[in-house]
Every structure is written in structure tokens, then in C-alpha cells.
Image (spheres, rainbow, N blue to C red):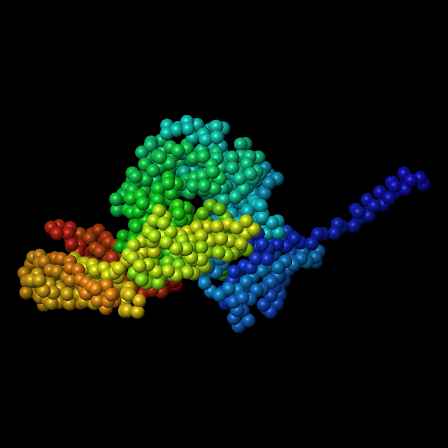
Amino acid sequence: MNHRANWLFFLTVTAVLLAATPLVAAPPVVKTVWWDATNETSLHPAMCDVALTLKGTSDQAGTYQWDPADGSGLTPAAAIGDRYAIQKIHTYTTAGGCAPGNTYAAKLRVTNAASETTEKIYYVGIFAPSQVVQVDRAIDEGLWALHKGMTRSNCSYVPSAACGKWSTWQGYYGMWAAATEAFFSKGHTELGSVNNPYTETAQRAISGILDVTTTYAVGVEPLGNADSNGNGLGIAFNQSYQGYQTGMLLAAIVASAYPTGIARTGPANVVGRQYKDIAQDVVDYIAAMQYDDNRYGGWRYSSEDFPDNSACQWNAIGLISAERGWGLAIPPWVKTANANWLTYSHNPAGYYGYTDNSYLPWGSMATTPSGLVQAVMDGIGRGDARWNSAETWMRTYWNGGTSYAPIRTSYVYALFSFAKAMLQHNPPIVTFGADNLDWYGDPVSGAAKALLDAQYPLTAASHAGGWWSTYGQPSGEHYSFITPWAIMILNKTTIETGRPIAVAKVNPTSAVVGQTVTLDGSGSFHQAAGRSIIAWNWTVYNGATEASGIRETKSGKFASTSFSAVGNYLVKLVVTDDAGTPATATDQTTAVVSLPPYPPVAKTRPARFCNQVKPWILDASLSTNPDDGRSEPGFPGDFIKSYGWDLDVNGTFGDASGVRPDVTAYYSTKGAGTYLYRLRVTDNTATSFPHSGFGDLSSTADGNVILDGDCACVTNLAANAMRSRVDLSWQHVGADKYMIYRKTTGAFAKIGETTAPVTVYSDLTAVNGTTYTYMVKPFKTAATPQEYCESNSVAATPRATR
């Protein structure tokens, strides 16, 4: 047999053997989620006795086991249901040896049908409980909820490309863009390691949103040329509500932090183009969609609709990202017209309206944040009367009020645009309001605390670890957006990812001359968990601006100083990280140094007394004390120590005393009519601020009592506690309106009203497990408009289960 025959024989035998022998299967490729997108061994944040999710994936079906590495051992083998979501909810317990500082190399083991096994480590770190750790844990679980909710398929335009969407959550493409941006905000992008499961998720996500875009012709508009790059193209989602959704598309593309990335899919003029060029065409389409009247330069549902301050915010957020993140061109007339819209839709009271300056669907909390973030886009900020009054309005109703639900716990829709406005204001705003509230980090009233309280438990039947129909969202289409919005708010996302964030605080925020003031940079953090802040440098100025000159410099996470004169002092913090090329971030705040005291402010509630219901009570509970609780170091806090009433207006205030005195005996001797009285409140200044040289301070207020023998009072108020609400009902007594009051402790506060003959009211802001006391007052609009006589009081406690 010659060599050619030998070779043919070898090929024949080999082919037969290969045909008769099954191919050897490859072991499964197992991946566990990375906390830091740049570091596989980064520690997932955890706390003792608090559940967390161990998270992994596999490229093959089979069985899986988890070993938490705390001595509890391997879990029993279980069949893999979803290869993209192999998880175990586990708690590292104190009883099991958990303590802050512990680290655990949890292990995921996957075995395929050929009995081949692969293991992968999941790194966990135990930290002492703090809001920072709680926030990190919330982001970790929220991203996993989004990852599990993704639908994975091939793209429409390029079937060989991998796409991802969230149709099981909501059909709006804007939600897909928000979810995409949430992953990008934590640094999980398509440029990440192939060993991190979220890298594929990010790649599918960006392809998924580009796959559902469409192109339009853009050019010269009545206000100017919308075609910034001269190609005649605009790009948007191929779906309705483009006035809302196009800005979300733009923000997500820029958040990719990959301007030279190439679109793997999409229609002609999208596929194969760089992300930065696509983003410019999205900017141009937003410009073309703007309402064609220079006085009302905003956006609404569709192209060139008359604007509303619900839709406008989303295009503003996208345009800010495009301009600041990638330097994309925004036609200048867009901002000019939008600034005119802000003037038109701004109410002198401070809030921004919906389609004008007065109409407020869902209350001003949903539209005023929109005005603020548009203002940032237009270069408007603190110092402008519109901004100042809107910011004051937001602080006033941050925790709710008599007319509006609290933004902090009511509308994540609005909270997201508020956070963007605060973070993208130049410089970023950390505290707001006269009390310098830390809008993000305050442990009681901060946005982070509200979102932490609202996150779904890991054991929830659906959306576990995410956010869904939490809060009283205005309509159902918002629900699916809440998880990505919450993640981005908690992550304090601006535009860049993986950056240090400076947070400057002074304590106390309002000090007296000579008092030690602490400069606190401990709230600063790094968006990339593998990085740390290693330097805190402070600059204290001689006045409220840099132009006043530098007073002193300090260094360290904490520093202290004091001031010898009354005034406002600018304090600036620069933090530096440990990157090879160090990155810095800046924040600033103001130290307010005053020489108290301030006098209290006397205020009374309207009083109308009816013969049918006694006793007759005057009410001074609305009186306030600006110095309440404050003092010079080492002295007791200031407070209102007395309430004196001058009923006969003779200049003395000894006719009655107390916050709510019974004046039945005095006015029972009077006939029907209107009677003037005066209230004087006095504080404790002499004791609280002895070095001020002031005695106790007082203020007075006048009020009227209306004696009306014909009026009738509500005497049969009833309350029915339901889940997350309390229903009230009473009998109509001939009033024009009814004012509804509520309290838990202390004084009643008005929470709403009804117009007669409506005699039912539902308190939808009630919190389960809290006992509330309610009272109703009738109101007459004729003659002297006034509410009068208190109803009977009733208590109710809503429960989570009935």
C-alpha cells in the first residue's frame, strides 16, 4: 500500500471513529456577579443578620449548589431554572460567628448533564451597620432585580446580535433606557470583563434600546436650525410618547461612557455608527420636537405639542448629559426658549405648574423638580429668583404639608429629577432649606432613607430586591421605572461613573460667634467600590463667596474651626482618590454664624364659637421659635416658655394662658359678634443666650373670635382604618367646606379639605401601624371667611393586613 493509500485509510478510519464516538461536552462556564465592575474580588456589602442574595449564572443547564462559606455547608443540588439567575438568599448570623470585618468566599457549584462541574467564588464583606452600607446593599440587590427581569433574545435588525429588554416589567422603551443607565451608573458597561455577568447584560441592554429606534428628517425649525451636524437626521424610539422617552434614550447612550462604541443593531443610519454620533442626532430630534413658540420652549407627549412640566424634565436630563458628558452641541435657541417657558410656568409662590403656572396635577411636587432640572440645563441656579423660590418651596413641602404630599416619600418620578437638579447644579447642592437639610443623606428625612424603607424584601413574590408600586405613584406606567430611578438616586448618579463624590458638611449648620464648628467630609464616597478617597482638603473663605478671599485651609476627613464675627462663610471641600491618575471631586456648603437670639413668632388659628358645642378653645399651636433647642455652648436650649392672652385688649396678657386655653367663661358673657384679642408668646433667651445681653424675647399677634349662635358643629366624626389609609365620615352641618386635621402627638395639622356637601375624606398618606387622631372643622365663606368649632376627635390605626 503506497503512502497515498495509507493516508486515505487513516482518514476513513478516523472519520468512522469520530462518527461512532460522542463529542466530549465542555464544562459549564460559571460566573458570579462582581460588586465593583473593575475588580472581581471586590466584596459585596453585607451586614450580620441581614439577608443578601448570592448571585451567579451558567452557560449550561444542570444542577447548582451554593456554599456560603460560613460553615453551613453546600446546599442540596437543585435544578437550574434560569441560567441567568442562579441565586441563594442567605443571612450571615451573629450566632454563626458573623462580625464586622469578616469576609466570606461563598462558592457557586454547577454540574452539567455530563457530570462536569465548575465552581466560582462570590466575595462577601461584613460591615458595621450604616446608611452607606445599606445603600450599597440596596443598589446591589436592585441591579440583580433588573438583571433577572431582562428578556434576552436576538435583535430585530441584526438577528445575530444579542439584545435585552424588559417587556415583563413594562412595554415602554424609556424604561429599558432607564434600566440600561442604572447598570452604567455603577460602572457595569459593555467594556467590562467577560467574567462579570453584568457585562453581557450591559451589552444586551444598549443593543436592546438601539434596536427599537427610528430616524426622522430634521432641519430648520421656526426657532432655528435643529440639525447641528448637518446630516439631516434625528433619532428617537419608534414608539409613542417621544416627548418623554427620547431624553431617556439620550441619557442612557451617554451613560455608556463609550463615545466611540459602535451600534451592533438598529435601523439604517443607526447600525454601524458611533454612539457619540447617534447621540448628536438624538439631541437634534429633541430640538426639533420643541414647541415652536419662543415663549413656551418645552416638550410634551409628541413632537411640537404645547409643553408640560412632566415631560420637559426628561429631555432636560438627557441634554445636560449630552452637553456635559460628551460635549455635544445643543442649539442655543433651545435653552433660550426653554428659559422663557420656565418664566411662564413659574408661580410667584415658588412652584412650577403643569401646563401653566397654576395647574398642579399630583400636586406641585411632580412639576417643580422638573422646573429645577430644566433650570440647570438653561444655566439658571441659586441666585435666580425662580430657582430660589422653587428650592424653598421644595424644602417647605419635602416632608409634606397641609396641601401637598411629601416628595420624599410620594413620587420617585419627581424625586429622580430633583436629585438630578441638585447633583448637576453648579456647584452640586448637598443641603437645602433654611435648616440646611441634607436632602440625600439625612438619617430621618433624606431621600436615601425613604428609598431604603421602600425597597421590596428579598422574599417578595415579585420584584424582590427592587422597587415597584411603592409610594402613591400618580399612574401605573411609572411603576416599572422606579427600580432604575431608585438605583440611580441612591448611587448619586450625575453623568460620569466610577468617580469620587465629595460631600461637605458643617456641624452645627448655624453657629454662634466663638462656637467650635466641625468640618465633616465623612459622607464623601467613591462610586467605584475598589477605589478609596485618601485626602480631604478644606478651604474656608472670609465670606459667602470665593471673592471674599481665603480665611484658612484645613485637611482631614474631620477638621474644626470657629468664627469671631457674624456672617455667612463659604466652605469648600476637595477630595482625592487613590487611582493611578488621581481623580478629585469638589463640594461646598456655607457655615452660618449668627448672634442669636431671634424672637419667637406668635400665631393663632381662626376661632368661631357655636353655642351647640363647648368648651370654646383658642389655639396658639402654630406659633414658632426660630431658636428652638439652640443655645450657647453649655446652656439649656431655647423654647417658648409662656403664652399670654389679652382678651379684652387692655394691654395686659393675663386673661388666659397656655397653648390652648379654655375661654368659655369669658366669651359666654358676650353676645353674637366679632371680638378682637391678642396673643403674646415669650421665649427663654436670657437663660439660653446669657452673653447676648438680651432678656427673654416676645412677639404678639392679633386674632378675632366670632360668636355665632346659629352655626352647628360636627359631633359625629367617625374613622375607619384600612390598609395604608384611614376613611373619615361625618354629618353635614350646613358649612361651605370642611377642614380635616390630623396629629400623632402634639398639635393638630391640617391635611386636607372637602367642599360641602361632601362629608367623607380618605387619608391616603397614613402609614401602617401608626395611630392617628383626627378632627374636622366646618368653614364658612360668607361675611368673614373662617373655620370654626372643633369636632369630636377620633383615633385610628391603619394595618398592613385586615
Q: Which image quadrant is residue 117 in? A: bottom right
Q: Which image quadrant is residue 10 in? A: top right
* Rendered location of residue 209, percent (x, y): 51, 41
What residue is drawn where x is 49% and y is 59%?
A: 137
What residue is drawn where x is 47% and y is 42%?
A: 325
* Rendered location of residue 713, percent (x, y): 16, 60
Which quarter of the rendering shows the N terminus?
top right
Q: Nearer the viewer, residue 575 or 789?
A: 575
**Number of marks:** 0
Q: Nearer the viewer, residue 164 or 253?
A: 253
**Is 667 on the left-hand or right-hand side of 770?**
left
What residue is drawn where x is 5% and y is 65%?
A: 669
What residue is drawn where x is 54% and y is 49%?
A: 581
Using the rendered image of the protein, determine whether residue 446 is visible from the camera's viewpoint. no
* Rendered location of residue 60, percent (x, y): 65, 52
Using the rendered image of the protein, determine whether residue 785 is visible from the camera's viewpoint. yes
* Rendered location of residue 407, percent (x, y): 35, 52
Which quarter of the rendering shows the C terminus?
bottom left
**Is 791 on the left-hand or right-hand side of 335?**
left
**Is 413 on the left-hand or right-hand side of 731?**
right
Q: Nearer the viewer, residue 197 or 344?
A: 344
Q: Which residue extends farthest bottom?
A: 95
**Is 469 on the left-hand or right-hand side of 710?**
right
